[in-house]
Image (cartoon, rainbow, N blue to C red):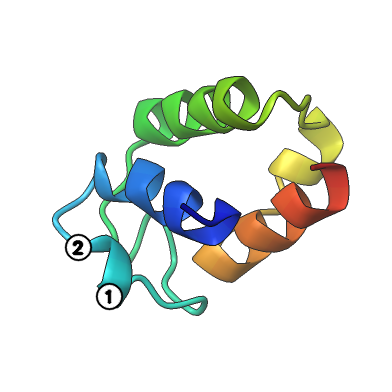
Amino acid sequence: MTKEMKFKEIIAQYCEVAPKDLKDALRFREDLGFSSLDFMSFLGELEDEFDVELEQEKVVTIHTVGEAMSLLNEVA
């Protein structure tokens, strides 16, 4: 499984959108219905799954699926 597919599968656990339908422009809160707790849990899963540490300063700038994937690509 590719990194991008695993990433999208993790997102899909928190919303009602299939991994294949997750587009870069989708916003976590407005489009996918993430709560603050959902988002923090999602970030924790990313860190565990990909064995990375996400910097808080960069995490607060993430609003879309594409931005999250870009950050993951930077650190993983």
At a point 81% along the width and 44% down the height, the residue shown is 58
Q: Residues within 10 Å of mark 2 (few under 14, many from 20)?
A: some
Place of residue 61 in the rendered image (x, y in percent of width and height, measured from the top left): 72, 53
In the displayed structure, 45 sits above or below 75; it is above
> Residue 29: which quarter of the image?
bottom left
Decide: few, some or many residues near mark 1? Use Cα within 10 Å; few <14, some 14-19, many ≥20: few
Q: Can you say which quadrant of the picture contains the C terminus?
A: top right
Dot 2 falls on a residue whose secondary structure is loop
Task: Tell me, yes or no, if residue 64 can be seen here.
Answer: no
Amino acid type of the residue tagged 1 in the rendering: Asp
Total labels drawn: 2
Kindly indicate the quadrant of the structure image that contains residue 35. Answer: top left
34 vs 5, nearest the viewer: 5
Residues at marks 2 and 1 touching, judged by CB atoms closer than 8 Å: yes
**Picture coordinates of residue 22, whole percent (x, y):** 35, 70
Say left or right for 66 vs 70: left
What amino acid is at disc 2? Val
Answer with left or right where residue 16 lies relative to residue 25. Answer: left
Q: Which residue lies under the disc numbered 1? A: 21
65 left or right, relative to 37: right
Residue depicted at x 57% and y 33% = 46
**Camera-side residue: 35 or 21?**
21
Confirm whether residue 11 shows in the render.
yes
Examine the rendered structure and indicate whether residue 44 appears above or below residue 74.
above
- Please name the residue shown 54% across and 59% down the image: 4
Give the spatial CA distance, label 2 vs label 1. Answer: 6 Å
Drawn side of residue 25 relative to residue 14, left or right: right
| Residue placed under numbered mark 2 in the picture | 17
Up-down relation of residue 54 to residue 64 (above or below): above
Q: Secondary structure at mark 1?
A: helix
Kindly identify the residue that appears in the image at 34 percent across and 49 percent down. Answer: 9
